[in-house]
Image (cartoon, rainbow, N blue to C red):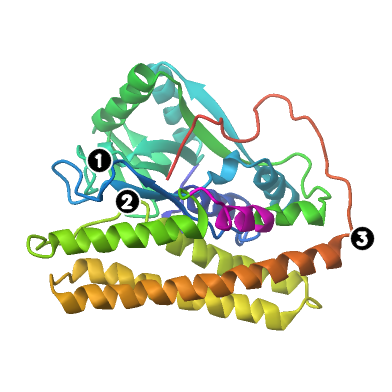
Amino acid sequence: MGFDQKKLFIDNNSFCLLGVIGAVARYKYDVSNINKLYFSHTYQYEKQEDKIRFQKNSDLLNINFSRQIILNKEECIKRLRGYYGIEIVYKEYKLFDELMIDIEYFSSIGELILTEIDMFYVSKDRSYHEVNDQHVMIIHNIDKHKGLINVMDNKYGFFDLPIVDYKDFFVEVTERIKRPLYLMLVKRDRLKYNIINKNELFKDISLTIQNRKNENKKYGVKALSIFFEDYLEFLTWNNETLRKEFSIPGLWTINADLRNNSQFLDEFAKENVVFNNVLLSDIKRNLSLLIKNWSIFNRTIYIYKPTKDYIENTKSIFNEIIRLEGEMDNLLDNFKHMIERQFCDEELPLSKENLRGFISGVPDKVYYD
């Protein structure tokens, strides 16, 4: 079977996992998008030490922004099946030769495979042999004679991954981390377009609000405020020595979340034309302003000038983000309450079909992004 490279593309603003699922669903089943899959506007801020500093031999800071893994959430699996009639199936591998045999087989029939990878093993990436950064990409072909796996992802598009690097990653997973490596397929669900409970579709709104109001300083808006304080302290202590651009691990997830949320609201508005359009417009406006301010902050990292004015400018950006986040709290509370009022009488039973053969979903111990 042939492979049409022009037909396969990934939305630029997607998470790697969400992006590759959407790309394959579009390629195989003409699913235009999977924007209704989830809504998430949360923060999880992790520090490796008391103070922000550079990781050893790296231009990355010793902190990380992350969020809940999408496909570890049962309701997202249900939405993927209920809205789009597709599912994610996987197989685990403990032997590299077996993994290669399956990749060759699926490639020979034109199947697209999703594989987990660590950017530590991708030579194109700045993390190569320096920093661990979990990722997901599509395998569309393999050339064992040249020792290359032909892949695609949301960062570099189409490129070649040397089999030796892929094998090093496999050894890392199976021997050091001591778990299998997984390949995944996007398949048509045999119960195509199941009936789904509308209330279930908006659990993410409640989870988002819970995260944002969490008293633990690691989560929510409190975590964001702590990051701002830590970052300003970092600038102050380094304002005489910092002369190069640097990166904040996981910071990209914030903008990706914001853009995915905006797309989610567009899909929501199409299907719920009687819903409060003023409220949806206000939320989208807030999202757009947050995207703008986070983009401004991201640019400051690459034009860093160690001056007092630079630090004051950074403070003003942070203050505007905090102000917008305060408005977002009220908007999301209103969104949640209106959803509950409008859909509480429309509940329909969720399909509880027990699939045989492959298992839907991704194991809890598989981490991406």
58 magenta-colored: no
Answer few, some or many: residues within 10 Å of disc 1's Cα (few below 14, many 20 plus, some between 14 and 19). Answer: some
Q: Please state which of residues 6 and 196 is positioned toward the viewer in this rendering.
A: 196
Instruction: Give the residue number, with chain letter if any, for mark 1.
Output: 131
Residue 235: quadrant of the picture:
bottom left
Cα separation, mark 3 vs mark 1, equals 50 Å
Instruction: Give the residue number, with chain letter if any, for mark 2.
Output: 249
Give the overall secondary structure of the magenta segment. helix
Write down the region rendered in magenta.
Answer: 205-216
Is residue 11 visible to us here? no
Q: Position of residue 14 (x, y in %)?
A: 47, 58
Q: Is residue 21 left or right of residue 336?
A: left
- Quadrant that contains the C terminus: top left
Q: Please state which of residues 331 and 115 is positioned toward the viewer in this rendering.
A: 331
Residue farthest right in this picture: 345
Query: SS of the residue at dot 2?
Result: loop
The residue lying at 51 percent from left, 70 percent from top is 325
Is residue 343 visible to us here? yes
Instruction: Give the residue number, with chain letter if any, for mark 3.
Output: 345
* Label 3 vs 1, first from the N-terminus: 1
Cα separation, mark 3 vs mark 2, equals 43 Å
